[in-house]
Amino acid sequence: MARPVLKINDLKASVEDKVILTGVDLEVKGGEIHAIMGPNGTGKSTLSQVVMGHPKYEVLGGEVTMNGEEVLEMEVDERAHAGLFLAMQYPSEIPGVTNSDFLRMSKKARLKEGEKDQSLMKFIRELDATIETLNMNPDMAHRYLNEGFSGGEKKRNEILQMLMLKPEIAILDEIDSGLDVDALRIVGEAVNSMRSEDFGCLIITHYQRVLDYIKPDFVHVMMQGRIVKSGDISLMEKIDAEGYDWIKEEVGIEDERVVVEAESGRPVRLDSCGTKEKLGL
Ligand code: ADP
Ligand code: MG
């Protein structure tokens, strides 16, 4: 298998008429772990949703390719088939569909042309073993997807999906929120166990604590809907020690958020006058 590569080029997107992504450039290859850090409200989750194809977000410009194929033209299931995976910040509950049925269907949907489906026995064995690795309750397999799961259980369940589906590029959005130290370590080990030339990972977080367990090769900072600074792990250490103010100063911005509440209570873009024009949209 060729080394996978996800390329994001000058990606601009809006939600409910608010421009959120203002030109994101990023390339994630197999064998690499990238971290996107940044304060709340800077567009990190929006980036993951746009790459995965959430219908609420409108792409205004730019390109996303996965192994050279145009991602933005694809349906969500085609994106999964192409090897993309998203662990969501807020996973949805799907009553009526058990976790194990969901995983079995998702695995089937990812089969390449001519590839044979795994036997049910094999699937069950793999599922049970993976649930055990993640130190999850064995009855998780038979419960409805995320229904009544605690915050931490939902996060582990996203990692269970990643381990079972074996994507080529995984985006993990705030996978660390709601996890205690033990769960954090288990999730870290799971991601590390996937490290190979065939797997690339983008970890989105606004804390650095998950990065105690998963050492990223590249660290990026997102502000105002774009990546304003990139570096290696020393960038993360500096943010941990000094916060984000020095970056804002360096970039020359006062407010890192994409959208602020106006006096009217309606959200507006920080630099709403002429944003679209400035972005060339
Ligand atoms: P982050 O993940 O960096 O905290 P988000 O991408 O979630 O930031 O959000 C960036 C901005 O976009 C926020 O102001 C948020 O309220 C707005 N936003 C994101 N998704 C939606 C949505 N579905 N509907 C309305 N506003 C949204
Ligand atoms: Mg977010």
Image (spheres, grey):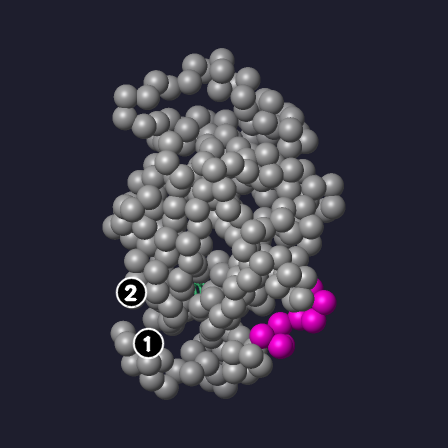
Side of 16 relative to 123 (left or right): left
**Residue sitting nearer the eye, 151 or 211:** 211
Tag 2's secondary structure? Answer: strand
| Region in magenta | 240-247
Q: Disc 2 designates what residue? A: 61
**Cβ atoms at labels 2 and 1 below 8 Å apart:** yes
Q: Residue at x 64, y 32 (%)?
A: 134
Residue 187 position, x and y percent, is 63, 40
Amino acid type shown at disc 2: Gly
| Residue 96 appears in the picture as rendered | no
Residue 56 position, x and y percent, is 36, 58
101 is higher (above) or lower (below) than 4: above
Specify whether residue 246 is painted magenta.
Answer: yes
Residue 154 position, x and y percent, is 58, 42
**Residue sitting nearer the eye, 37 or 250:** 250
Disc 1 residue: CB within 8 Å of ligand 1:
no
Residue 214 position, x and y percent, is 63, 46
**Mark drawn on residue 185:** none
Q: Disc 1 designates what residue? A: 279
Q: Residue at x 54, y 21 (%)?
A: 126
177 is higher (above) or lower (below) than 162: below
